[in-house]
Amino acid sequence: MRIAVMDVGVGLLPAAAAVRRLRPDADLILSSDPDGMPWGPRAPEDITARSLAIAEAAAAYRPHALIVACNTATLHALPALRARLEPGTPVIGTVPAVGPAAVSGGPVAIWATPAAIASRQLHDLIDKFAHGVRVTTVPCPGLSDAVEHADEAAIAGAIADAVERTPDDVRAVVLGCTHYELVADRVRAALQRADEPLLALHGSAAAVASQALRRIGAPTTPHVAAEGRLTVLLNGREAGLTSAASAYVEGRSLAPVAEVGQ
């Protein structure tokens, strides 16, 4: 079984690691676009073209499913990706986990890129899944770039800035960019206040990994002994995991089985 995961950069690591936890025997193909990052400022048609390019690079390895581990690519390119690859290869998009966060009753904060917060699609999700719940959108300029480069000082600064914009009474936070899931522990630590209930963080990686396996009828078997292979594609070229990937637990969990040129 082969699962492909695509994103502009290291934001694909949480979904890949989630697949690995559910099916350690699955072969993973990670396809990213370091030459084109960041995607956020690009025009929608450019994002679509670049998404198709890295998806097709992954498709050459004949995956059984493709996870679009990027909110921006899902927003702009999902219809084109599905038109190109389905029904042969199911394509699973990623959207912020507004619904699960709203179940708590709120108040809820959504941390996301400025471009995502300006999008109509995010506000449609809020209207659909968080009706009657107080939701605050929190722009996090620079956080995804800081995570992409594993810049600890920039990560700390961007998180601190976002904390300042987050209401004190928020009890659930949606991590509305897949990059943010790589620093979830730091986000929680920065937001958590003494003598208050544990703050809930809601990412998308576990859900999209489970959905991908459901789409291809693959049961979860987290205790199998076999370890699947990992192929890393940077703009279609086989490579190793980047140095930034190794800065995160998710990247280090994949590194032992990484293979190049196979």
Image: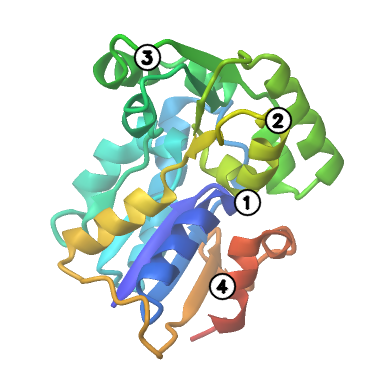
Which mark lies nearer to you, 2 or 3?
2
Depth check, mark 3 against mark 1: the one in front is 3
Name the N-terminal-most of marks 2 and 3: 3
Q: Are marks 3 and 1 in contact (CB under 8 Å)?
A: no
Q: Is residue 67 left or right of residue 151?
A: left
Q: Which mark is residue 194?
A: 2
Q: CB under 8 Å between callouts 2 and 4?
A: no
Residue located 75% across and 48% down the image:
149
Q: Position of residue 218 (x, y in %)?
A: 20, 71
Q: Quadrant of residue 64?
A: bottom left
Q: CA distance from mark 2 to mark 3?
A: 32 Å
How far apart marks 2 and 1 lie (CA) works out to 40 Å
Q: Of the two numbered discs 1 and 4 on the same chain, state the one appearing first in sequence.
A: 1
Circles 3 and 4: CB atoms closer than 8 Å: no
The residue depicted at 46 percent of the width and 82 percent of the height is 229
Residue 34: image tag: 1
Instruction: For the residues labelled 2 and 1, say whether their Cβ atoms are less than 8 Å apart.
Output: no
